[in-house]
């Protein structure tokens, strides 16, 4: 359902109907607005609302319970927030066990999924109706060779077909961009450090390509930024799924270590309309402590990460000239 003003009004009436049917306390306007906002997050799209009414009915019931605990006659937005928090707490046992009680600090302090190396991206886990993101480190090496980009995950049978396709697309982009007139005398390797399960999907391909470009140019890239996004053969950045969870997963790591104002996540510009971030992430962004950078091309990505302009061929097609890329602003 589209999140148009008319549909929001219809959704509000539907919530009122469910409240009466379940014999809940009345919900004030802010509580209804909070439920509508949460519905958009469930739909993973700021412009849509979920039509899975069982999820909304359960939330109404639990918010009503917390209002009863406060001995109030009306359900307020803080009761809805408490219900949402408790729902997450009940289903995120795997994340808390994996992190020793702190998903962010454990991942960093135990160096299981560090935030160093030439490239980063958040990845996620899906546990039924609960998803969460965790950062994973990607490293790349480059040397003279025969035009091969080795996917180490695939070589050891830990990489899925879609991920391997993404690596082949990266190889094709490199050859088309930098070796149109002669063979690509490059041999490179990509790997997810300390990953012990299957790596699947192409949402890390922007990060992998940036890691390779960093290795080739020997220009370091900012370790305070994470990257998620798919790239095609033309260097265009494509949308991915789970963008909210991936941003929040990296935010949790940064918050545990201390927000500096330089941390953030690069995401596909096509995913901006899907942003429905947690309130603490939104607040940190509003205060300039955390940033979300929308990107449309690999040139924009590497310019933000490396802090130097991307290059392009000159008229003879032999020399890469520095090309100024407009500064990518956070959203």
Image (cartoon, grey):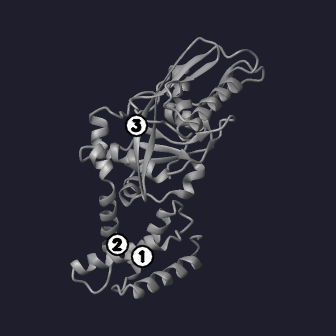
- Quadrant in which the N terminus is drawn: bottom right
* Neighbourhood count class around disc 2 (C-alpha, 10 Å): few under 14, some 14–19, many 20 upward: many
Discs 1/2, front: 1
Crowding near pointer 3: few (<14 within 10 Å), some, many (20+)?
Answer: some
- Can residue 314 be seen in this snapshot? yes
**What is the C-alpha distance between the residues marked 1 and 3?**
40 Å
Which residue is at a point 24% across and 44% down the rendered structure image? 100
Q: In this orientation, does residue 258 appear?
A: no
Rendering coords of residue 116 (x, y %): 38, 30
Q: Position of residue 15 (x, y in %)?
A: 46, 81
Q: Quadrant of residue 229?
A: top right
| Extreme-front residue of the structure | 157
Q: Which residue is mark 1?
A: 57
Residue for badge 2: 80
Q: Marks 3 and 2: in contact by CB < 8 Å?
A: no
Q: CA distance from mark 2 to mark 3?
A: 33 Å
Along the line of sight, the residue nearer the viewer: 35 or 24: 24
Q: Measured along the vertical axis of the image, is residue 182 above or below residue 110?
A: above
Element type at mark 1: helix
Q: Residue, x 34% and y 60% (percent of image)?
A: 88
Q: Is residue 315 above or below residue 59?
A: above
The residue beneath circle 3 is: 224
Q: Residue at x 58, y 32 (%)?
A: 164
């Amino acid at each position: 359902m589209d999140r148009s003003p008319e549909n929001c009004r219809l959704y509000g009436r539907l919530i009122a109907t469910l409240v009466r049917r379940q014999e809940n306390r009345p919900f004030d306007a802010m509580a209804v607005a909070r439920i509508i906002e949460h519905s958009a997050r469930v739909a993973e799209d700021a412009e849509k609302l979920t039509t899975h009414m069982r999820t909304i009915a359960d939330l109404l019931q639990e918010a009503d319970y917390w209002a009863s605990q406060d001995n109030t006659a009306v359900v307020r937005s803080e009761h809805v927030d408490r219900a949402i928090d408790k729902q997450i707490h009940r289903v995120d046992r795997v994340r808390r066990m994996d992190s020793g009680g702190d998903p962010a600090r454990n991942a960093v302090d135990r160096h299981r999924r560090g935030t160093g190396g030439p490239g980063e991206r958040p990845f996620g886990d899906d546990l039924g109706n609960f998803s969460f993101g965790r950062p994973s480190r990607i490293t790349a090496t480059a040397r003279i060779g025969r035009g091969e980009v080795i996917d180490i995950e695939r070589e050891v049978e830990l990489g899925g077909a879609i991920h391997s396709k993404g690596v082949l697309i990266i190889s094709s982009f490199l050859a088309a961009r930098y070796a149109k007139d002669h063979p690509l005398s490059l041999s490179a390797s990509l790997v997810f450090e300390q990953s012990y399960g299957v790596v699947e999907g192409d949402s890390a391909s922007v990060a992998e390509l940036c890691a390779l470009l960093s290795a080739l140019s020997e220009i370091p890239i900012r370790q305070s930024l994470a990257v998620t996004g798919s790239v095609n053969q033309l260097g265009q950045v494509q949308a991915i799924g789970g963008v909210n969870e991936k941003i929040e997963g990296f935010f949790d790591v940064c918050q545990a270590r201390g927000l500096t104002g330089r941390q953030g996540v690069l995401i596909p510009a096509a995913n901006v309309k899907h942003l429905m971030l947690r309130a603490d992430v939104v607040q940190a962004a509003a205060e300039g402590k955390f940033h979300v950078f929308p990107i449309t091309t690999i040139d924009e990505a590497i310019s933000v990460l490396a802090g130097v302009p991307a290059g392009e061929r000159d008229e003879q097609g032999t020399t890469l000239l520095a090309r100024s890329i407009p500064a990518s602003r956070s959203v």
